Amino acid sequence: MHAPSEQSLALTLTSPDGWQVRGARIEGRDMFMGVIPVRFDTQGRATVMYGSCSSDYMVWRLWVTLENAEGEERIRFFDWRADGSPQ
């Protein structure tokens, strides 16, 4: 996976039937780099951009909150290394 800093990053999310995205954001996993809101469309696609870091090892985390028809919530996260391979 190649996820370069300061360039558009296309995300695609597939959720189980009956579950919808209620919120999503990107944050630094190990250091605070701000909060980047992510808005998935009805097909589960989003485009985001995150900044670069002076650290040689910056890991970003995508937090996704899902909800089903009964109001049950699940939170999932996905990590990847900036400008490198997934974690």
Image: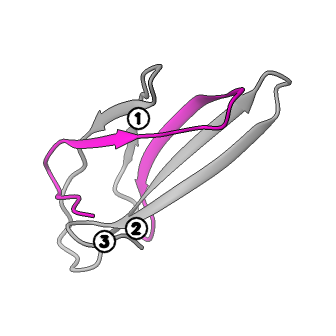
Q: Earlier in the sequence, mark 3 or mark 2?
A: 2
Q: Residues within 10 Å of mark 2 (few under 14, many from 20)?
A: few
For the record, the magenta segment spans 1-30
Kindly state the secondary structure of the residue where label 3 is placed: loop
Q: Position of residue 39 (x, y in %)?
A: 42, 28
Q: Position of residue 2 (x, y in %)?
A: 21, 62
The N terminus - image quarter: bottom left
Q: CA distance from mark 1 to mark 3?
A: 19 Å
Residue under label 2: 31
- Look at the numbered discs 2 and 1 and tell me whether their residues touch, using CB distance below 8 Å: no
Residue 81 in the figure: left or right of residue 43 = left
Of all residues, the one furthest to the front in this rendering is: 17
Residue under label 1: 38
Q: CA distance from mark 3 to mark 2?
A: 8 Å
Disc number for residue 58: 3
Residue 64 lies in quadrant: top right
